[in-house]
Image: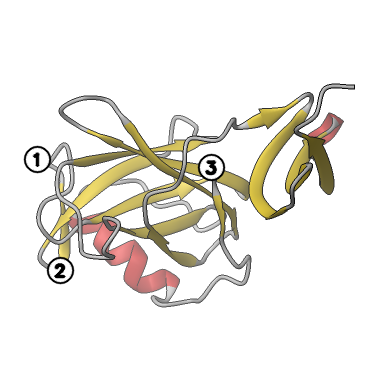
Amino acid sequence: MEDIVDPDAVELLRPGTISTIADILQLEFDATKGQALILNVDCTLQPSAGITISSDPADDDTVILYIDGDLPDPNLDATIDTGNSGVFNIPVGFTTFTNVRAETGQRISSSVVYIRGGYLTYINMPPTSDLPTEVGKYKIIAKLGQGGMAQVLLCLSHGPGGFNKLVLRSTSFIAM
């Protein structure tokens, strides 16, 4: 199951500061796209090393970086003991970030976040369970509750032209 993250982005850094960081790293900065700072943590909420992250959607301008100290280090290919990673130039809209253990490829967690252009969004990513990621045509965002016979899921439905709709789905544990 994926955690749902509050869609209210917090502007931690001004676009000029983000642009300066991009210049230092020799990255192309697109102010119409979003940026994310991700803290990868273990089940005790301590920073987790050896994690790689992916972003869906991503395009040719999207860059994933891992942070050493205060700045991204383009030579790192996974998180170090700080657990920090970042993603530059993310297309605007709902984005799924997925963590995997670099050594084994084991999926650790996924979070769905709404990315806003020109903003840096902070995401805390603890491990999540291995529930299915889809129910029919719906992408599962979060499990809202469960009873003896069914569970209620918050899902995302994708439509033409980038249309997205949040939907509640109930799935039964009993075959009829």
State how far apart marks 1 and 2 are (Cα): 15 Å
Location of mark 2 (residue): 70
Q: Is residue 18 among what the camera can see?
A: yes
Q: Nearer the viewer, residue 165 or 173?
A: 173
**Image quadrant in which the N terminus is located:** top right
In the rendered view, tell whether residue 149 sits above or below residue 16. Answer: above
Point 51% across, 67% down: residue: 119
Q: Nearer the viewer, mark 3 or mark 2?
A: 3
> Horizontal placement of 79 versus 170: left or right?
left
State how far apart marks 3 and 1 are (Cα): 24 Å
Task: Give the tally of numbered discs.
Answer: 3
Q: Is residue 163 among what the camera can see?
A: no
Q: From the top left corner, tell me how far across and down residue 16 is, in percent.
A: 38, 72
> Horizontal placement of 141 versus 129: left or right?
right
Location of mark 1 (residue): 75
In the rendered view, tell whether residue 3 sits above or below residue 169. Answer: below
State how far apart marks 3 and 2 are (Cα): 25 Å
Amino acid at dot 1: Asn
Q: From the top left corner, tell me how far across and down residue 99 is, in percent.
A: 35, 41
Location of mark 3 (residue): 96
In terms of secondary structure, where does tag 3 sit?
A: strand
Q: Image quarter for residue 9?
A: bottom right
